[in-house]
Image (cartoon, rainbow, N blue to C red):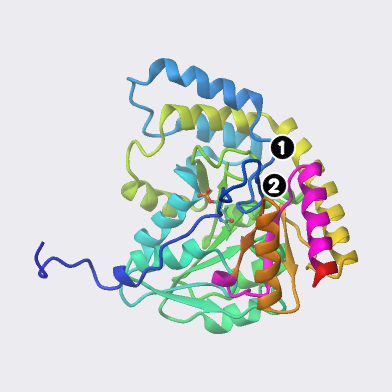
Amino acid sequence: MTDQIRPKPGIMDIALYVGGAGHVTGVSDAVKLSSNENPFGPSDKAKEAFQRAALKLHRYPSTDHAALRQAIGEVHGLDPARIICGAGSDEVIGLLCHGYAGQGDEVLFTEHGFLMYRIYAQAAGATPVAVKERDRTTDIDALLAAAGPATKLVFLANPNNPTGTMIGLAEIERLARGLPPQAILVLDGAYAEYVDGYDGGAELATRLPNVFMTRTFSKIYGLGGLRIGWGYGPQAIIDVLNRIRGPFNLSNAQLEAAEAAVRDQDHVARCREENTRMRAWLAEALAEKGVPSDTSTANFVLARFADDAEANACDAYLQAEGLIVRRVAGYGLPNCLRITVGDEASCRRVAHAIGQFKARA
Ligand SMILES: *Cc1c(COP(=O)(O)O)cnc(C)c1O
């Protein structure tokens, strides 16, 4: 190794992404509520498709993902030609950064936005810019004020992670129309399915030339371990992303499980209903114990504590009880803990433990 071998500027500034913990030392039946996973897992049809894919592991997968794009298009009423599939929506976010942003360009996102926006912006050599929110909610005026001639991409998760808040489509359209002409607005709809009747911004991405939508199979579809996501937007953007996408970025197992999953909308509806019911129950139970949260539109609740010390102490208490939630100091919310809405037993367990913690403190 020689000191002449160096990565591109900025790469070593990237802070490694740390996923939600999955284990507590010494606890065998820990409940994982740290990664916004669907407690019910995927559709049985997706599992069956995955197993069938095991019979043809020697075959290369399709490069154009035509069958999966067709299925997504049918279910969502979208033109399959304007859809791109990736290894999680993470890959699509990465393709957008690599395709559109580089040295001297700015990539905007909201103050408490998803960490991958910053990481992929830095990986592309661009400058990440975090824009203030108002009371843990996207502030369109602040985003418009921050956008300028160097802005290439604006990432907005709606509902947002880890705040759980969302803004309306009229406000989003005002943002899209007010951005400088060279900027793309990316609507990250990772949690869109949890909002009954919300299209994730699909209609806006159909109508406006500067709006792109990303979606994932990792959350309500319960396929986070398989890594499948997709993007939809103007044909010109899809054509750019397809040029830099790896031709075999998705395996047969990913493609076939995702196709079966998206065609099983009954499973999606059941998971949405159960999430809505338990999310309301959990938020209410926490509020009764003196732990407020903003009205969440996703599959988690952002529990707010008096200060950083109380949040950390509660996290430690929960861990000792075998309950794993997510610290969100890295998202600028050190006095909060993000708790995924699990099944009823997990929700009851975590609410009970937080009540005990508050009673001791
Ligand atoms: C979980 C999540 C994603 C999904 O990432 P995948 O790569 O599709 O697993 C995207 N955006 C946000 C805001 C998320 O929370």
**Label 2 to label 1, Cα distance in Å?**
8 Å
Q: Nearer the viewer, residue 40 or 240?
A: 40
Q: Nearer the viewer, residue 335 or 102?
A: 335
User: Which residue appears at 73% of the width and 46% of the height?
Assistant: 342
- Residue type at mark 2: give it: Glu
Residue 161 in view (yes/no): no
Q: Nearer the viewer, residue 199 or 217?
A: 217
Where residue 51 appears, x then y in whole percent? 51, 20
Residue behind mark 1 = 268
Which quadrant holds the N terminus?
bottom left
Magenta-tinted stretch = 329-357
Residue behind mark 2 = 193
- Contact between marks 2 and 1 (CB within 8 A): the answer is yes
Let me know if residue 340 is in the magenta part: yes
- Residue type at mark 1: give it: Val
Which quadrant holds the C terminus?
bottom right
Q: Quick check: 83 above or below 350? A: above
Residue 226 in view (yes/no): yes
Mark 1 element type: helix
Q: Residue furthest bottom?
A: 145
Q: Quick check: 311 above or below 219? A: below
Q: Nearer the viewer, residue 50 or 99?
A: 50
Q: Quick check: 133 above or below 359? A: below
